[in-house]
Amino acid sequence: MSSTPGAGEGSGGTPPEGGYVAGFTCFVGRPNAGKSTLTNALVGQKVAITSTKPQTTRHTIRGIVTREHSQLVLVDTPGLHRPRTLLGERLNDLVRETLLEVDVVGFCLPADQRIGPGDQFIARELAELAQARRTPVVAIATKSDTVDRQRLAEHLIAVDQLGDWAAIVPCSAVRGDQVEELADVLAGYLPSSPGPLYPDGELTDEPEARMIAELVREAALEGVRDELPHSLAVVVEEIVPREGRPEDDPLLDVRVHVFVERDSQKAIVIGRGGSRLREVGTTAREGIERLLGGRVHLDLHVKVAKDWQRDPKQLQRLGF
């Protein structure tokens, strides 16, 4: 049975008899469906990188939404897609493994795009999951601010016809429309808990090094050619305090390697005279300083790891 916001069983975010609920939810959808942006909007702070390029998310990233009666742990995943490389296969496996471990699934279907074969492919996988494990699936019409009311209504009808959803929620993560209502609906499907799973005030359990790597990769992805996103990997080599600095003015040295697959891609990232790499460094450093709460010297190096997406040993070395 499909339903509109708030109509899900136990929805409203407040569990029966005033108890507490806590658990995990996973956002799935084809690439660039707005999953990371929605995660950040629900958490209220940037914990997942966003980009107009597909396949931006490479790791599951947990954002933690703690409220009076509930704690919702958001697991962001790569977009499910038909893989063309070993990396693509591993990203799909990562999504499927995550789906088996969550309490409720959010299926993101952007309102500015027609329902297509990719959505139908994911819907079939989710139908099997719901049948095998009775995991509720909430359909989320993301990017509702990008279309008019007529187009949104048509999209919601198409979403309803796509599958048997626990609820259907239109929302705009960018404008904040229906974000709180979505949190209510998702929390309504969480199990009872004696209390929160993570301490109050904690927003993510991601290691700092991984978040730094994601911030660098996000900055490097902006404004580049379509061929680059799949070919870009970032590894943080070290994070060390600069020696000899005064106690009231510390400085962290952050050394990062950016890996691409070909020399031509290396030239794209570096830019003419190093101009592009300087822009990447400036943008990433600002985000890293906000993350770490202090001044940072960011040392970026671009290296070629030939065809790393198809090489099991290189994939492992780069953290996949």
Image: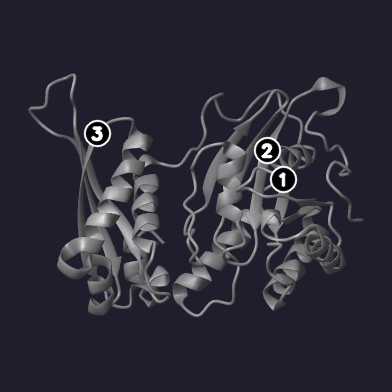
The numbered mark, 2 or 1, whose residue comes first in the sequence reads 2
Apparent side of residue 96 relative to residue 263 in the rendered image (left or right): right
Evaluate if marks 2 and 1 touch, with contact meaning CB atoms under 8 Å apart: yes
Please identify, in this view, whether the residue under mark 2 or under mark 3 is nearer the observer: 3
Type of amino acid at the residue the image marks with label 1: Asp
Q: Which residue is mark 3?
A: 295
Q: Is residue 30 above or below residue 245?
A: below
The image quarter in which residue 240 lies: top left
Q: Which residue appears at 40% of the width and 56% of the height?
A: 218
Image quarter (top left, top right, bottom left or bottom right) of the N terminus: bottom right
The amino acid sitting under disc 2 is Gly
Q: Residue at x 80, y 58 (%)?
A: 149
For the residues marked 2 and 1, what is the alpha-carbon distance in whole angstroms? 6 Å
**Is residue 72 shown to the viewer in this render?**
yes
Residue 103: mark:
1
**Up-down: is 10 above or below 53?**
above
